[in-house]
Amino acid sequence: MDLPLDAPNDLIRPWRTAAIAAGAIALVELLILLAIGGGALARSVSHRVERAAAAHRADAHARARHLARHTTKIAPTKLPRSKTEVLVLNGNGRQGAAAAEATRVRSHGYRIGTVENAARSDYVHSIVMYRPRYVGEGRRLGRDLGIQLVTPLDGMRARQLHGAQVVVILGR
């Protein structure tokens, strides 16, 4: 007994199933190709990134060596510590901080000029500033006190120093 064909749908279904199966296989092949291509691209990019990072590290080392060569030069001092007068300013707002720092500066052999409050009391870091022509004295004082920020006189006039060659402004 033969079953009658149910119109054109019976003829279409096997083709639809075959098309879905072929599409699924093509999708799997596409995903495999994308994974292979993505892996190759990732390797290529990672090699470029590694080379760029190595070049950046080499450049940073070269800059550090250049900076070390040019910043380790110590300017000659004109005055011995006993003749270098220091103005100590309290820039952190803590009472007695300038007097304590003045004692510390004196213990290194410097002469203390004036000890007073700075115009502001919100300095974050301590600063050593020096008058023109006293670069060596300023850097030496910064080294003695462990203060890394040493700069030419800024924001103060030479007459405000009361004869001092260098200034210490205390930060927090």
Image (cartoon, rainbow, N blue to C red):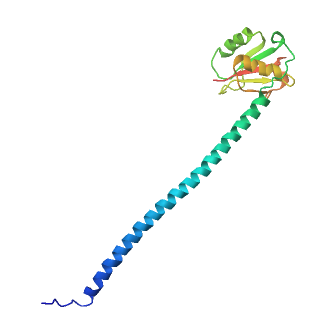
Q: Residue at x 32, y 82 (%)?
A: 15
Image height of 163 relative to 70, above or below? above
Name the quarter where the C terminus is drawn.
Answer: top right
Q: Residue at x 55, y 58 (%)?
A: 41
In the visual, does 87 lie left or right of 45? right
Q: Position of residue 110 (x, y in %)?
A: 78, 11
Observer-nearest residue: 52 or 152?
A: 52
Observer-nearest residue: 129 or 77?
A: 77
In the visual, does 45 lie left or right of 55? left
Q: Residue at x 82, y 14 (%)?
A: 84
What is the quadrant of residue 121 in the picture? top right
What is the quadrant of residue 57 in the picture? top right
Q: Position of residue 73 (x, y in %)?
A: 80, 25
Q: Position of residue 39 (x, y in %)?
A: 50, 56
In the visual, does 115 lie left or right of 94? right
Observer-nearest residue: 67 or 29?
A: 29
Name the quarter where the N terminus is drawn.
Answer: bottom left
